[in-house]
Image: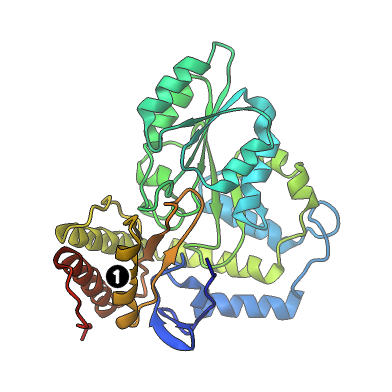
Amino acid sequence: MKVPILQQIDKTYTLWNKKKFLFWGGYDYFRLSWHPEIIKALNRSNNIFGINSGGSRSTTGNHPLHVELENKLSEFFNTKSAALLPTGYLANIALLQSIYTEYNIIFIDKYIHTSIIDAVKLTNKTIKKFKSLDANDLKVKMKNYCKSDTRPLIITEGVGLTMNGNIPPLDKYLKLAKQFNGTVISDDAHSVGILGKTGKGTWEHLNLSQKNLIQIGTLSKAFGVYGGFVVGKRELIKKIKSSNVYIGSSAFPLPLCKAAIKSLEIIRNNPQIILNLQKRSLTFKKRLNEIGFNLNISPTPVIGLSFRDENKNQLLKNILIENKIYPSFIKYFNGPKNGYFRFALSSEHSDEQIEKLYFCLKKFKRLKKNKKASTETFH
């Protein structure tokens, strides 16, 4: 599959094959990568500090901006400490590399992200997959494999696992962790900044305690910047900062540190944008179900559609292209083998743009049912 070359024109349009298309892909949910205050903070930092601190943070590259960003992360997520990594992928590997000796067995969701799969493989521990989003299946497997002296590790994603942005039963996972003397890791890449009243993620959305929970996140999605992080107790973060991944990685680019600090500030001071996007997501998904789609109704902005039929895929692609909407059809880890459409609402899409996407999906449903050609476009 040829990877498309896209060039963002503004917050909601992209250039594809030299033509302008309305864009519903990606994961910059608040378009903070375009925010003038964040860009200003990045540029100013670049002029003052340069781009690179010149080494690993464990040697000569540890800069005050790195420390400031980690402090801001721990403040935002109500934890004692934080570790900043170059990417979310590396954050997962660094975490597992740091704590795997404390556990005997690892339970992972069947559709967990590949970064987790790669991380747990490196531990050489026994790995058991449970049915996606199924706490009952996890309980059965834990009863079968956990003895009195076993310390289990349960790993899930805060949002994801399937293409529809489903939210896992984290409350039930935490109860199982307590019952079997274990710990839960939640990769909240797609839920930080999105779920909860203040964007702290899945645990806040479900009104849970952070006890027995380790949270991983990314700054590249809702926060619109770049980089991964782990937040938690000081003892945990100290172990991560002693890992080979952390020690051997170049320090985080300084301008991005300043940009991320500003982004956290903007999200913290404007929680209403989080609630507005949740409301918008719920409303749109309900409308799509009313015309025959079968979406999980959650307040997450991702809408995944899979038809397992090349003719149907091509039909929807054609409708989208006719209406100057980029057809966000992707093939990704643990997703449908034939690919799927991934649309993501943002806080910056106008009501008219949402109606345009709705028009296309409604037209697709009608043509799929009637099997008649139509050149009708949105006006």
Q: Residue furthest bottom?
A: 18
Q: Total number of numbered labels?
A: 1
Q: Is residue 68 above or below residue 186?
A: below
Q: Position of residue 167 (x, y in %)?
A: 37, 45
Q: Specify the amino acid type for callout 1.
A: Leu
Q: Is residue 9 visible?
A: yes
Q: Residue, x 46% and y 38% (percent of image)?
A: 110
Quadrant of the image occupied by residue 324: bottom left
Q: Is residue 379 above or below residue 135?
A: below
Q: Position of residue 134 (x, y in %)?
A: 37, 33
Q: Residue, x 29% and y 51% (percent of image)?
A: 298
Q: Position of residue 37 (x, y in %)?
A: 53, 77
Q: Is residue 122 above or below residue 113?
A: above
Horizontal side of 189 relative to 376 (left or right) equals: right
- In the rendered view, how is the structure colored? rainbow
Determine whether the residue tagged by mark 1 lies in a helix, strand or loop: helix
**Residue wearing tag 1:** 315
Q: Residue, x 66% and y 51% (percent of image)?
A: 90
